[in-house]
């Protein structure tokens, strides 16, 4: 059994943009096929650049704020309570569309 509290976890940068901060609750290797279980915060106007994971699903839950995600060519508006799955191989980018509120995302990755 493991237990952690979000307030006790050090921040690190996401691989696509180190300015976007995350806290990894469950690290890669702890649970088979799980790449991470994390929470990221995008500041107002902050953008996570377009990228792709060829062999991993990503599942996002919007905890707070508003934003958008572009998957392939489709833009989807994100708001608190939305849960979204990005399939392996789908190019995607995210941004915080608010001018005054952080976008909080809790997410995990699952390997194929």
Image (spheres, grey):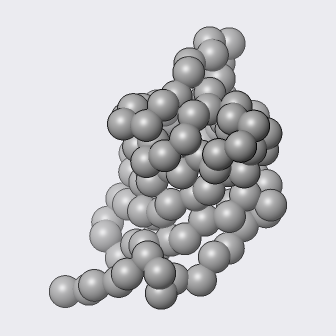
Position in image of residue 79 (x %, y %): 48, 31
Which residue is found at the position 50% from the left and 71% from the top?
A: 24
Q: Which of 108/102 is in front?
A: 102
Query: Which quadrant of the figure contains the N terminus?
Result: bottom left
Instruction: Give me the residue at 67% from left, 73% from top.
Output: 12
The outermost residue toward the front is: 100
Q: For this rendering, which residue is in front, 100 or 38?
A: 100
> Is residue 27 rendered to the left or right of residue 99?
left
Percent coordinates x, y for residue 33 in the rendering: 36, 59
Q: Is residue 64 left or right of residue 2?
A: right
Instruction: Name the residue at the left extreme.
Output: 1
Could you say which is closer to the camera, residue 10 or residue 74? 10
Residue at image point 62% right, 27% down: 68
Find residue 14 and report its image quarter. Answer: bottom right
- Residue 9: tell me if it is visible: yes
Residue 9 % position (x, y): 51, 83
Q: Number of marks in the image? A: 0
The residue shown at (65%, 45%) is 101
Q: Is residue 15 visible?
A: no
Q: Position of residue 2 (x, y in %)?
A: 26, 86
Residue 70 position (above or below residue 85):
above
Name the foreground residue: 82 vs 86. 82
- In the picture, measured across the screen, residue 17 lies left or right of residue 53, that is right
In the displayed structure image, the side of residue 60 where residue 1 appears, left or right: left
Quadrant of the drawing holding the C terminus: top left
């Amino acid at each position: 059994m493991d237990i952690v509290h979000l307030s006790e976890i050090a921040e690190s940068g996401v691989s696509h943009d180190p300015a976007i901060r995350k806290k990894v609750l469950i690290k890669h290797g702890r649970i088979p096929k799980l790449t991470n279980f994390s929470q990221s915060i995008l500041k107002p106007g902050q953008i996570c650049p377009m990228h792709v994971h060829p062999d991993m699903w990503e599942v996002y839950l919007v905890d707070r704020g508003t934003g958008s995600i572009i998957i392939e060519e489709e833009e989807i508006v994100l708001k608190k309570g939305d849960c979204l799955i990005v399939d392996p191989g789908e190019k995607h980018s995210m941004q915080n569309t608010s001018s005054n509120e952080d976008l909080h995302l809790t997410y995990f990755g699952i390997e194929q």
